[in-house]
Image: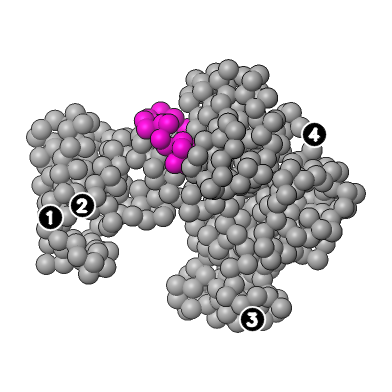
Amino acid sequence: MAEVAFGGVTYDCRDGETVLEALLRQGVDLPFSCRVGLCLTCLLRAETGSVPAEAQEGLKETLRLQGYFLACQCRPGRNLKVAPPEDAAIFGRVKVVALDRLAPQVCRVMLEPANPLYYRAGQFVNLRRQDGLGRSYSLASVPRLDCHLELHVKRLPGGQMSNWIFDELETGAALDVQGPNGACYYVPGRPEQSLLLIGNGTGLAPLMGIARDALSDGHTGPIQLYHGSRHAAGLYLRAELEALAARHDNFDYVPCLSGPANADGCRAGRADAVAFSDHTKLAGWRVFLCGYPPMVHGAKKLAYLAGAALDDIQADPFELRDLRREPRD
Amino acid sequence: MTTSLFEKIGGEAAVNAAVDLFYRKVLADPQINEFFDDTDMDAQRGKQKAFLTMAFGGPNDYTGKDLRSAHAPLVAKGLNDSHFGAVAGHLKSTLDELGVPVELAQEVMTIAASTHDDVLNL
């Protein structure tokens, strides 16, 4: 059993338990979200003691060297003294410059960073409001094409952050962002490679960024984007995507409706099912999967079985927060 | 000094080429894929790579005790001789597909067969 010192108090950490689990169990109110090492919400800094390598996986070198680690992935072998992240090292200030509804349940948030954010289209940031509430959102913008950061926020039933963004956030407001994070992005160097992009809901955001990034980089291979929703209204930005497809011979946009009603020009069925019925052989392809976690995990397996190499499959499951059994008070 | 099996076969590059083929065959086989169905495919691939490294005679940390404890939950779920045989079949066809010479493939299959009792907790 190891001990974890935090905020002047020493807590015990049972064998096999993560630092996050140990602190939550003993009543510490620590921010966290995905619990699977992706979102970086539970980032802490080790002041003394060393953390296992897996607790720093996916972190930037600069953060690793400063002792930052993911509390949800850290099963400490020895005693640790930890502290919350230093704000200046992690968060940057952004200003909301535009808010508009792309669909009844999807809001586009345009942000202007105070200092330039160096990111790749398809990565994600953690957005935090002044009281500390934060969530992860993927970037739909492309650095070389867009001057603002673009996020697509889906209104979730009971979602504290999304409902606040829909109902209360105004242009001109200041927020903090941490990032960029994640490895779901276009990698230049193989312009002839075929790309398959599958997303549902606001999983479209990173995929749109990746597609536009690839096209502006001069990608010549086919780029096939499948976007799925239950309802026609959820197929947002359809006109823009159809216009993009009209401008580029190698880009195809395939809207898919999984609900009971169909609409003009949409394929019937879930985006992943439609995509895999169109493409049964994916050897040599690069595949991007974004959105609802069961779809992403299932599609990852199907893409692999269809011949795509695991290293060529980028999966970005949108793990949702508020996984506590009891709500926070 | 004699060249080891691992070096003759092509070392880590050969393992990397084999793991993608092998894991795909295993996952696609309805007789056995329930034992390999894991949402964390990257972790699952890591395990396949460790196994192939051992079977190719490469540096590995496998012990009989590890194999037993790792497979005990699967044996409880019904893992038996026919499943072991199916996995061995996929290993053989992977080696064939990669064009591994017959005598080297035979050595690999012998190493794999040596895990039989530990894997099935016999």
Q: Are marks 1 and 3 in contact (CB under 8 Å)?
A: no
Amino acid type of the residue tagged 2 in the rendering: Gln
> Does the magenta segment cover residue A283?
yes
Q: Quadrant of the C terminus of chain A?
A: bottom right
- Mark number, residue A197: none
Residue at image location 36% in from the left, 36% down from the top: A306
- Disc 1 + disc 2, Cβ < 8 Å: yes
- Residue A306 to residue A231: above or below: above
* Badge 4: residue crowd in 10 Å (few <14, some 14–19, many ≥20): some
Disc 2 or disc 4, which is closer to the eye?
Answer: 2
Instruction: Give the number of the disc on residue A27.
Output: 3
Q: Which chain carries label 2?
A: B
Q: Residue under circle 4?
A: A147
- Badge 1 and badge 2 in a common chain: yes
Numbered range of the magenta stretch: A272-290
**Label disc, if present, on residue B31 of the rendered structure:** 2
Q: Which residue lies furthest to the front in this view?
A: A261
Q: How far apart are marks 4 and 3 (CA)?
A: 42 Å
Q: What residue type is labelled 1?
A: Ser
Q: Which of A38 and A88 is in front in this view?
A: A38
Q: Which of marks 4 and 3 is in front?
A: 4
Which residue is depicted at the point 16% across and 49% down?
A: B86
